[in-house]
Amino acid sequence: MKPKKTRKVIITCAPTGSIHTPSMSPHLPVTPGQIAQAGIEAAEAGAAILHLHARNPADGSPSPSAEHFMAFLPQIKAATDAVINISTGGSATMSLDARLEGARAARPELCSLNMGPLIFDFSAAGARIDTWQHAWERPYVEGSRGRIMYNDMTFIERIMVEIGQQFGTRFEF
């Protein structure tokens, strides 16, 4: 008798990224409590990996701050066995040193790693917004058309050495 084939699936969930803004959705988690709750609920629903970005809880803007990451990571780690994946992409508005701040503080088992520069134009999403909640949102969204997330070989090597080799972190490419 031939063994039955099984298809294994690994589900990754990114509860909050760096693209959406609070004006785009009232469901975007921005506070540490909201991000922790969204991550925990995703793991309970079957996500094996949580791809995490931090937000400034005051205005919902993408944040590379270790303080903002550490405000929700311990709660997620205590409540789930999901693999924690910290973004090293952060946002195209962040320097490489800023983008690595969360990973340096958390020393996660997994980090994202973009293998080159990214043109990520989400400016058209701004046309659907009638009222912006925060002053940073409109220029952030509309400016994405002319923004490139810089990632050359020097950046990639730094991420692999400073995060991968130093902390034993693996990468999602």
Image (spheres, rainbow, N blue to C red):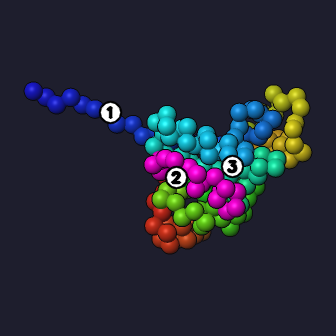
Q: For the point 49% across and 37% down, which residue is it? A: 44
Using the rendered view, name the quadrant where residue 87 is placed.
Answer: bottom right
User: Could you tell me how far apart the alpha carbons at marks 1 and 2 are, in whole angstroms?
Assistant: 29 Å
Q: For the point 63% across and 52% down, which residue is it? A: 72
SS at circle 1 = loop
User: Could you tell me how far apart the alpha carbons at marks 3 and 2 are, in whole angstroms?
Assistant: 14 Å
Q: From this view, report whether residue 114 is shown above or below residue 132.
A: below
The secondary structure that dominates the magenta segment is helix
Q: Position of residue 92 (x, y in %)?
A: 72, 53
Q: For the point 52% across and 53% down, which residue is it? A: 77
**Image quadrant occupied by the N terminus:** top left
User: Could you tell me how far apart the alpha carbons at marks 3 and 1 are, in whole angstroms?
Assistant: 35 Å
Q: For the point 56% across and 49% down, which residue is it? A: 76
Q: Which residue is mark 3?
A: 32
Using the rendered view, name the quadrant where residue 163 is placed.
Answer: bottom right
Residue kind at label 2, given as amino acid type: Ala
Circle on res. 78: 2
Q: Residues within 10 Å of mark 1 (few under 14, many from 20)?
A: few
Q: From this view, report whether residue 64 is shown above or below residue 58.
A: below
Q: Does residue 57 appear left or right of residue 97 in this picture?
A: right
Contact between labelled residues 2 and 1, with CB atoms less than 8 Å apart: no
Q: Which residues are magenta?
A: 66-83
- Residue 61 visible here: no
Pick whichever of labels 3 and 1 is earlier in the sequence: 1
